[in-house]
Image (cartoon, rainbow, N blue to C red):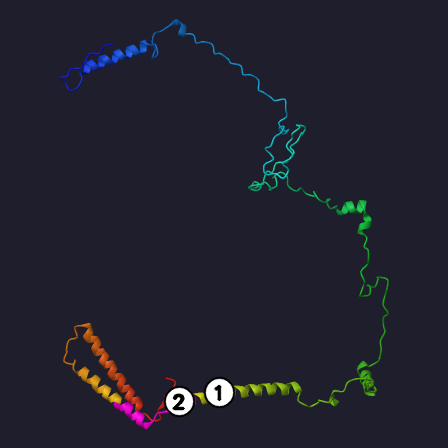
């Protein structure tokens, strides 16, 4: 088919020309069988009968699906019996049983009992017979094998009457006193040990003397250690000689004069505006106070010097 060319003078095609071109293309497409036909026909009023396709019967093998295949080596991998593989084809069962849980273990919950398969009442023993059944079927079981021994006499019967009006004139208190007064003393038993005539009667036991000796030895050992410690400390500590004491005092005074001179040189500073001035003033004051304390200590009597320092 032929299309009208667009004019080169215009920047875009005309609207009417595009509509006519579209209609023309649609008619050609449907006319060539590329789209549905809209022409009505009497043959299309009655729908065609559906064609029923019959399915062929399912193939069922004449061989059993349980019997292992002939000359199969599928089961020989990883087994300890690789020679059994049904080569003759006469095995009706698998030559090697399947190992269902050899890699990851049994399935979780496989060992759990089935909810309907629980233990029933009297499943492992017979039910206990009632007392009426035992009396009717086996009364010998109810008879005791041995009677209980009685520790008290039996209760008197109704026809057994005690003897009445039995009265005695004996005074049991007086009779008991007379019997004890007139009784002869008991003889000592032969072979009885007399503790008053022992060898160590009234003496201090030997184990107490041993314990006292051990305690005294321990006290002596502790006293010796303390004495040795005192002797060592007395030898290390010596009194300070008077000449040395005076020399130390003179040296401290000279040091105090030098520190005081340096401190007086900074007293004209009324404002301490820097950290260096503050630190310097604190240093001189601390040094002067320490020297004064040392001089005061050296002025005491009986000064002892430790030679370990």
Q: Quadrant of the N terminus?
A: top left
Q: Is residue 266 magenta?
A: no
- Locate residue 251 relative to residue 220 in the image: left or right: left
- Secondary structure at badge 2 equals strand
Reading the image, the residue beneath label 1 is 226
Residue at point 45%, 89% (across, down): 231
Residue at the farthest bottom position: 242
- Give residue 29's position: percent from left, percent from top: 30, 12
- Give residue 165's position: percent from left, percent from top: 85, 72
Q: Nearer the viewer, residue 254 or 148?
A: 254
Q: Is residue 246 magenta?
A: yes
- Give residue 291's position: percent from left, percent from top: 26, 85
- Locate residue 42 relative to residue 222 in the image: left or right: left
Q: Nearer the viewer, residue 88 or 140?
A: 88
Reading the image, the residue beneath label 2 is 237
Q: Quadrant of the C terminus?
A: bottom left
Query: Magenta residues: mostly which secondary structure?
Result: helix
Range of magenta residues: 233-250
Q: Is residue 280 above or below residue 122?
A: below
Q: Is residue 190 above or below residue 95?
A: below
- Locate residue 234 relative to residue 293 in the image: left or right: right
Q: Are marks 1 and 2 in contact (CB under 8 Å)?
A: no
- Give residue 134's position: percent from left, percent from top: 78, 47
Residue at the farthest top position: 42
Marks 1 and 2, the one that precedes in the sequence: 1
Q: Residues within 10 Å of mark 1 (few under 14, many from 20)?
A: few
- Secondary structure at badge 1 equals helix
Q: Nearer the viewer, residue 18 or 96?
A: 96
Q: Residue 202: name its quadrant.
A: bottom right
Residue at point 63%, 86% (across, down): 210
Q: Residue 144: name its quadrant.
A: bottom right
């Amino acid at each position: 088919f032929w299309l009208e060319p667009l004019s080169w003078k215009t920047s875009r095609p005309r609207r009417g020309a595009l509509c006519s071109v579209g209609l023309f293309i649609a008619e050609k497409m449907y006319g060539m069988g590329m789209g549905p036909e809209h022409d009505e026909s009497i043959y299309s009023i009655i729908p065609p009968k559906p064609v029923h396709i019959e399915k062929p019967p399912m193939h069922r093998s004449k061989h059993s699906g349980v019997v292992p295949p002939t000359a199969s080596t599928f089961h020989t991998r990883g087994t300890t019996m690789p020679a059994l593989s049904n080569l003759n084809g006469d095995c009706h069962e698998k030559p090697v049983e399947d190992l269902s849980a050899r890699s990851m273990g049994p399935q979780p919950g496989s060992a759990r009992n089935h909810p309907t398969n629980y233990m029933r009442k009297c499943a492992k023993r017979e039910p206990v017979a009632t007392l009426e059944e035992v009396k009717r079927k086996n009364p010998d079981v109810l008879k005791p094998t041995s009677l209980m021994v009685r520790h008290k006499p039996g209760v008197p019967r109704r026809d057994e009457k005690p003897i009445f009006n039995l009265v005695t004139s004996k005074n049991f208190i007086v009779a008991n006193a007379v019997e004890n007064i007139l009784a002869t003393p008991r003889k000592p038993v032969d072979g009885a040990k007399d503790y008053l005539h022992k060898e160590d009667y009234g003496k201090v036991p030997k184990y107490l003397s041993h314990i006292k000796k051990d305690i005294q030895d321990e006290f002596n050992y502790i006293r010796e250690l303390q004495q040795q410690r005192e002797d060592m400390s007395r030898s290390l500590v010596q009194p300070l000689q008077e000449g040395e004491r005076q020399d130390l005092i003179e040296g401290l005074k000279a040091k105090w004069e030098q520190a005081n001179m340096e401190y007086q040189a900074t007293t004209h500073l009324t404002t301490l505006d820097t950290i260096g001035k503050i630190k310097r003033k604190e240093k001189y004051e601390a040094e002067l106070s320490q020297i004064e304390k040392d001089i005061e200590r050296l002025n005491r009597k009986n000064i002892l010097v430790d030679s370990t320092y």
